[in-house]
Structures are given as C-alpha cells and as structure tokens.
Amino acid sequence: MGRLSRRAFALAALSTLTTASGSASASAATPRHPRAVREMRGVWIASVANRDWPSKSGLTAKEQKAELVAHLDRAVADRLNAVFLQVRPTADALWPSPYEPWSQYLTGTQGKSPGWNPLATAVREAHKRGLELHAWFNPYRISNQSDPAKLVASHPARQHPEWVVTYGGKLYYNPGMPEVRAFVQDAILDAVERYAVDAVHFDDYFYPYPVAGQTFDDDAAYDQYGGGFAGRADWRRDNIDKLVLETAARIQEIRPGTRFGISPFGVWRNAATDPLGSSTRAGVQSYDDNYADTRKWVQEGWIDYLVPQLYWNVGFAAADYAKLLPWWAEVARGSRTKLYLGEALYKAGDPAQPAAWQDPAELSRHLTLAKDHPEVRGHVFFAAKEVAADPIGAMARVVADHYQQPARPPR
C-alpha cells in the first residue's frame, strides 16, 4: 500500500472510532461516591485444540453451554469484566457462518452443526452477567495439520488451493494475496454484523512463527505484488498493516463503536537489533518474525487496544517483565490506543517453568509494578482453564491483592 492510501485507510478507521474517555467524576454534592474504577480485567477462552472450551469435542449442546456458562460465572466470581472468546480458531467458525465451516472443536467433525449457536449464546450470557465479549479471531491459520484433503470438501482452502501455503506441518492462508485478505475480513466481519460483540480481537499469529530449516513459500505473490518494496520483509509487513487498517475501517462501517484490539508477541524488537527496541534478548521479534509492526500500530492509533503477551517473570534474563512493562508504557504514552498486558497465568505452578512461577505471588507482583505506569489500563490472563483450576492459588492472590472491588472496562 502506498503512503497516501495507507493514510487514507488510517483516517477512515480513525474518523469513526469511539474516543470517549473515562466517566465524569463524582459531584461535590456526593463525595462518598468516588469515580468508578475502570480497568480491563480479562481472560482468554481458547477453543483451538479444545484447550479451554469445549473441554473436548463431541459434547452435547447442553454440556457445551454448561461449560461455557461456568467460565463466565468464574470470571464474574473473580471480579473480571471481559472474556476473549476464540470463535475462529482455524479458518472455521463457532457460529453459522456463510463463509467457513463449523469448527471441528465443537463436534469432532469439521462442518457439522453443534445444534446451537455458541457465539450468539456467549454474547447474550456474557452481557447478562455484565461482562464484555471480545470475539477472538485467528486471521490466517487454516489447520494444525498439513493435508488439505482432511479439510471438509466445501472448505474455502480446498476451493482455492492457490491461497494456501504449507509450512511447519500446518496450513496457512497467504497474507500476501489481496483476495485472501478480503476473504479473511469478510469471514470475520460476518460475526460483527450478526452479533453485538464488544470488540474484534486478533492474537499473535500473522505470518507464522519461524520453523528452522523451512521457508514460507510466498514467491509467486511476492513476484506479483512486491515490486514496490525494498525487500520481502517490508512487503510482508505492509500486508499485515493493510489487514489491520482495512479491518479497523470495516468494523466501524458495520457496527460503529465496536473496538478492535490485538494481542501480539511481547517483544517488538530487541535493542541489539534496533535502538528503539526493548532491553531484551528474545529469540523471536514480532517485527522481524511475524512481520507485525506492533509498535507502529499503537503510536499511529490504528487500533483501539493492544495486549502484548508479556509471558515472562520478573528477572527473566532474556525478557524481563520489569523491563518490558515500562518499554510498552512508553510506546503507548500519548497514543489513543489503550495498553493492557497479557499475563501468563498458565505458567503458574508448572514445574517445567523457572522457580519464579512456583511462587503464587509472581503474577500479583506484575499488577503491582503496573500501577506505577498509568498507561497500563489493565490485564488479560491466559487462560480460562487456569483461572478455573488455579493450581497454586496465583489467580486467587491476584484477586485478593488487586480485585477486591469490581471495575468497569475502560471506555
């Protein structure tokens, strides 16, 4: 995308985005009613591979709904205020989509109706409980296996094999093809048009994470569309920029006020790679490996919120939470994009993790550190299974230390 057209997309996205700020302070006549607390307190509910929900494929509709409602009730009990429900895990759908098949994670068979509408129910039940429902979509992942023949015959990836790249034992849509980008947006925005979701949410999978010894084969698309760029990396980043800007603009056209947020890998670039980067030594850098210029999206105000996945403990040598937190706060300073932090609850009590994660207070320390940075407007916990099980009481400690009073999400 040229500079002028990119600016046009940005202006289109920004012109209709909600800009209301926090609630008005209590009047002098009612001093006993302080300003309501506004912070994001969210939890991801992952459906891919039946990670969080449904707990396994093939449950009855009644059992699936009961499990979903239990996750919502637990969020309320922990005084959370938003759930991030994965509704398009692998180029499929948790609603009756005209674009993509029903998800195999519901029934065990891709394309088979589960006999109910999970997304519609989730929106209704979340709102009934005062929870926001952020619909979580994975843009480009088609399948966690590499054989297109295992997809349902009607799958768009089988109808358009030229859209597909096999890489790392998985199938992906090619982000460099304009027709793919348009289709992905159409599939996602169908849910926005049908259901009153509070936000559209993307995770960290844009171009796939590197796999040693393998090449993501987008030669044909690069030959056709990459001529105006200094190199393939710049072209790939531009493809993801276009996805972000176009999606933001189309969300507002369809359902004004619906927010758009992204949860990228927690390191943009290491300082050794770029002096603007963080004081980290991470093996992955989203700018270079996922071709996602997350820092730019924040500073340009292209999206409503960002949730970098800061999935490391305080003091971790390669990526110290205590160093990444102020780096991201500085990135967000002065931007219209709200900053929330992704928290690795799943590591708490895992014996394979460093000793810091055996301490139930580790996550609570993260929230304490964040209070010194007003740019941080809340936290989102990965993921619902661990919120429910809480094996060493790390979530209970967060609630006791920080969530004694309810809070409303930021506007």
Image (cartoon, helix red, strand yellow):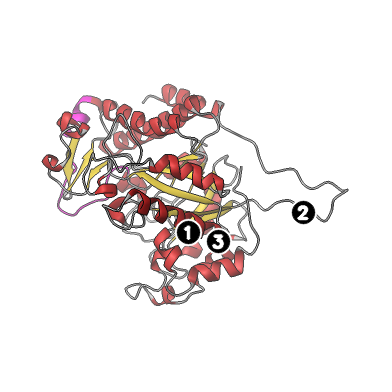
Q: Secondary structure at mark 2?
A: loop
Q: What's the distance in space between the residues labelled 3 and 2, CA to CA?
A: 23 Å
Name the residue rendered at 53%, 70% in the picture: 396
Q: Nearer the viewer, mark 3 or mark 2?
A: 3
Name the residue rendered at 30%, 43% in the picture: 114
Residue 108 location, x and y as percent? Answer: 23, 49
Report the magenta stretch's main SS: loop
**Residue 231: quarter of image:** top left
On screen, residue 259 versus residue 207, left or right, reads: right
Residues 163 and 121: in front is 121
Name the residue rendered at 46%, 34% in the picture: 195
Which numbered disc, 1 or 3, marks the residue that appears first in the sequence?
3
Dot 1 and dot 3 residues touching (CB under 8 Å): no
Q: Which mark is residue 77?
A: 3
* Amino acid beneath label 3: Ala
Residue 197 location, x and y as percent? Answer: 48, 38
Dot 3 and dot 2 residues touching (CB under 8 Å): no
Q: Secondary structure at mark 3?
A: helix
Residue at the right extreme? 29
Q: What's the distance in space between the residues labelled 2 and 1, CA to CA?
A: 32 Å
Judging by the rendered image, the residue that carries numbered circle 2 is: 34
- 84 versus 178 height, above or below: below
* Amino acid beneath label 2: Pro
On screen, residue 320 versus residue 372, left or right, reads: left
The residues colored magenta run 206-224
Position of the N terminus by quadrant: top left
Q: Which mark is residue 324?
A: 1
Q: Which mark is residue 248?
A: none
Q: Nearer the viewer, mark 1 or mark 3?
A: 3
* Amino acid beneath label 1: Leu
- 227 versus 280 height, above or below: above
Residue 99 location, x and y as percent? Answer: 29, 30
